[in-house]
Amino acid sequence: NQVFHDTIWNNIRYSKPESTPEEFNQAIRIAGLNGFIEKAEDGALTLIGDRGNTLSVGQRQRIAIARAILKDSDILILDEATSALDSESEGEIIANLQNLYEDKTMIVISHRLSTIQQVDEVICLDEGRVVEQGAHEELMEKKGHYWRLFRKQLIT
């Protein structure tokens, strides 16, 4: 979530300085930054303070996601990338990313299991070891470790 003392525009375009305004707009839409940028004093040209201290953690996460989208790599790794967002926003971003990365590889690392319900393959770890692997539905039917973790999160 590294954010620089620069504009929102430059912070997002850092990964691909030659990007077009259309690519930028797609990235901020998928990352859910449209509303924030529209409300910002100078829009995308609003200056972000040192280390993003004027932003919430969720806004910094969204900027990092938009930056990754703009880079358009064949592999996207999201390590707790949406942990500061509410479940609804997180779900929208993950769904948008799945559509965008349909023919690419996306690795999602999350303690919030609702984040990974729609992924193709879940790898469930316990103390650094793989204990289960499969699709969400398949693992829920097994009623094993993943199922217990998922139910525990639903209750709390």
Image: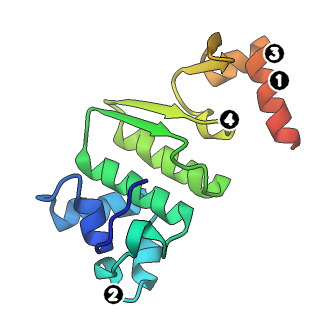
Task: Name the residue located 64 percent from the left edge and 19 percent from the top edge.
Answer: 124
Q: Are marks 1 and 3 in contact (CB under 8 Å)?
A: yes
Q: 8 above or below 2?
A: below
Residue kind at label 2, given as amino acid type: Asp
Answer with mark 4 or mark 1, whichever residue precedes in sequence: 4
Residue at the disc numbered 3: 143
Other-residue count near label 3 (Cα within 10 Å), few / some / many at <14 / 14–19 / ≥20: few
x, y percent for residue 57? 55, 62
Query: Looking at the image, is mark 2 or mark 4 earlier in the sequence?
Result: 2
**SS of the residue at dot 2?**
loop
Extreme residue in the left direction = 18
At label 3, the amino acid type is: Lys
Tell me the mark number nearer the camera, choosing from 1 and 3.
Answer: 1
Looking at the rendered structure, which numbered label has been put on residue 42? Answer: 2
The quadrant in which residue 109 appears is top right
Tell me the number on the disc at residue 148: 1
In the structure shown, which secondary structural element does the residue marked by tag 3 occupy? loop
Q: Which residue does the numbered mark 4 point to in the structure image?
A: 113
- Earlier sequence position, callout 1 versus callout 3: 3
Q: Are marks 3 and 2 in contact (CB under 8 Å)?
A: no
